[in-house]
Image (cartoon, grey):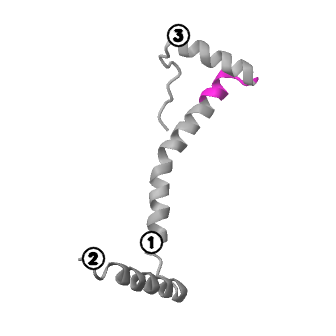
Amino acid sequence: MSELPTDIPINTELMQDTKALAQKLNISWGKLVTLALNDFVRRHNRPQRLTEQINAAYTDNLDSHEMAVLRGMASTHRRLVENEW
């Protein structure tokens, strides 16, 4: 495993704000930073997971009920637009 950084340059105002928040939450500054980084990574990865879930939902074959609904929708749509074009 590579060595983790121990000195991270942080804006003075941000450092003061995070220390105040950590104190308000009654947690250590390190714990607050860990929570913040975990949240950032989770939110960054969320769109990819959502896309994967949507793709998985659409790769499933339709069951007989879904096929019947789809046929009904197509028939209704055809009737609605048959004289439009």
Looking at the image, the residue that sits furthest to the top is 12
**Residue lying at the far left of the rendered structure:** 85
Residue at 51% across, 18% down: 7
Give the residue number, with chain letter if any, for mark 2.
84
* Kind of residue indicated by mark 1: Tyr
Mark 2 Cα within 10 Å, few/some/many (few <14, many 20+)? few
Q: Amino acid at mark 2?
A: Glu
Marks 2 and 3 close (CB-CB < 8 Å): no
Q: Secondary structure at mark 1?
A: helix
Marks 1 and 2, how far apart in space? 30 Å
Instruction: Find numbered disc 2 in the image and state the secondary structure of the residue it sits on.
Output: loop
Which tag is nearer the camera, tag 2 or tag 3? 2
Mark 2 → mark 3, Cα distance in angstroms: 65 Å
Q: Marks 1 and 3: which is nearer the front? A: 1
Q: Point out the stretch of residues depicted in magenta.
A: 26-33
Per the rendering, the mark at residue 58 is: 1
Compare residues 57 and 36 and report the one nearer the observer.
57
Q: Is residue 55 magenta?
A: no
Answer with mark 2 or mark 3, whichever residue precedes in sequence: 3
Along the horizontal axis of the image, is 51 left or right of 40? left
- Residue drawn at (49%, 70%) of the image: 57
Q: What residue sits right under mark 3 in the picture? A: 12
